[in-house]
Image (cartoon, helix red, strand yellow):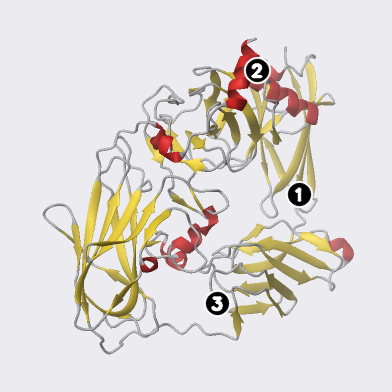
Amino acid sequence: MKKIIFLLLIFGGTVYSQKDIPTDYFNNPIEIPLILSGSFGELRSNHFHSGLDIKTQQREGIPIYAPADGYVSRIKVSLFGYGKALYLSHPNGYSTVYAHLQKYAGTIQDYVKEHQYQKETFTFELFPEVNQFLVKKGDLIGYTGNSGSSGGPHLHFEIRDADSRPMNPMLFGIEILDSIKPIINSVFAYPISEDAQINQSQNPVKLRLILQKDGSYKTENIKAFGKIGFGLSAHDQQNGASNKNGVYKIKSTYNGEERFKVLFEKFSFAETRYLNRYIDYAYFKNNRSRVQKLFRQTNNPLSIIKEENEFGYINIQEEYTSLYTIEVSDFKNNSITISIPIKGEKLEILKPRENTKTEDFLFSDQANSFTKGKFSVYIPANSLYENTYLNIKTQGDTLQLHKNVIPLHKNMTITVDVSNYKDSDINKLFIGRLNYKGVPYHNTTTRKGDKLLIKTKLFGSYALVSDNTAPIIKPLNFSEKKWLSKNNTLKIKIEDKLSGVSSYRATINGKFILMEYNSKKDVLTYDFNDNIISESENNLKLIVVDNVGNNATFEATFYRK
């Protein structure tokens, strides 16, 4: 009867509007002080951070509790990204997400293991029935960990609305102690129109920040003309941590009137990649600092921009003195301001715009295709945010496709003609993206007749690479014909230094065993508590295959009581 009532609540619950966000509905998911290593909306690679990264005292295994009544709606285990993740749906229309887990709890963990053994796979995604795993507020649902692409032990926690859009959990009353003002790293001015200039330059200008007695900043006086915009790099810190987290609000004014406002409260996953249009992408790639542009360029539909006058730009006339200000705030309303005095002057240009013209000019609203040597490239329409010149060169099996200083919103296709290779050799080839040292990283490569192709969203250098080397397998905590009665686990390191590991399968005495793969450390782990072993003498067999089909087999005998 309780289950029936609960399901009625789930399907009949009211979905709150943003104005009616419940601030006392969700409890904290873990029972330790909440200190953040990452904030909501924080600028990350190709996306905005969709939750809170909660520190777990540099350890794993801290219990996670359901913050409200609900049911398990999704379970996903992946090598990268969220790693082991759990999704709860709640009667009020919201859902919560828990990522980078060490393991799940109780019947959820049993269900996961059962599925993994049934399908003989470590990674999977499941959507349980609504009444399969009901939870009450305070129920144990899992344990914190470091799985997936996590850079250290922590809990990634999200709250999403009824349309699966992530929202800032602090809006729901999740309390984070914060009495520290945001920190300003740099401020830039951008000439926009053809006749625009700033301090006799037509290129972006980094402004000198001068700390004032009241803790605010003032920049050097600038002399400008034409249509210009501004940008800044800033981060926030909360009490108890030195992490450089994202800010909550940025607001600019021009002569006292609001010009532009950005608020990190909610966004959709469909728009998150437009972060690359919002930041100064080229500056980030060259300097590893993300500058947020306080103006909306074409092809930037971001909903985090809440207010804009003239798209955030300002027009400077000669002999006109004005003041542009930027206010940066965190969720607790700790704020800091920057004042930028401007004098309108049209001066001699000492630093004209850098000439980037090449023979390859691409229109952003059109599909573009071209062939260089044995390489062909296809870029779909609306992949580029603006019309662009590209510098493209080829030499033998290497393609230099500009530099990764221009963002792509959609996948382009790179195709290479391999008709000059023997058919037996083609199967060992892949197209790899070269890092700054010239080392190739594997891209998923598809063969179509005498052509190989990849899809990628990154400009840069690519090469046709041959891999004839099998993966390397090395036991870590055991050796041949040893007794392992006191071991809780079997650990094996697997490596493939060129195309990378594609798959693996392990058995003991012919029976499949689940080996969890830590891709950060290249380590496979089998837990003896899975109770697959029933004999004293055990024969382990592990087969590892790389991304072009080279395989290696490891066999060992061990004993266990």
Determine whether, in the image, residue 469 is placed left or right of residue 205: right
Q: Closer to the camera: disc 1 or disc 3? A: 3
Characterize the local packing of mark 3: few (<14), some (14-19) or many (20 or more) Cα atoms within 10 angstroms.
Answer: some
* 190 up-or-down from 154: above or below: below
Counting residues from the start of the chain, the first of labels 1 and 3 encountered is 3
On residue 448, the disc is: none
Query: Nearer the N terminus, badge 1 or badge 2?
Result: 2
Which sits in the foreground, 12 or 180?
Answer: 12
Q: Does residue 373 appear to the left or right of 205 in the view shown?
A: right
What quarter of the picture does the N terminus occupy?
top right
Q: 381 and 152: which one is in front?
A: 381
Q: What residue type is labelled 1?
A: Ala
Three-letter code for the amino acid on which mark 3 is drawn: Thr
Mark 2 residue type: Thr
Q: Could you say which quadrant of the image residue 443 lies in? A: bottom right
Query: Which structural element holds mark 3?
Result: strand
Q: What element carries label 2?
A: helix
Which quadrant would the C terminus be assigned to in this image?
top right
Q: Distance between the residues labelled 1 and 3?
A: 42 Å
Q: Vertically, is 223 above or below 152? A: below
Find disc 3 in the rendering and name its residue: 388
Count neighbours of disc 1 (C-alpha within 10 A) and say few if under 14, some if 14 to 19, many if 20 or more.
Answer: many
Residue wearing tag 1: 470
Answer yes or no: do the residues labelled 1 and 3 have beta carbons within 8 Å? no
Image x and y of residue 181, in percent: 25, 46
Q: Is mark 1 on a helix, strand or loop?
A: loop
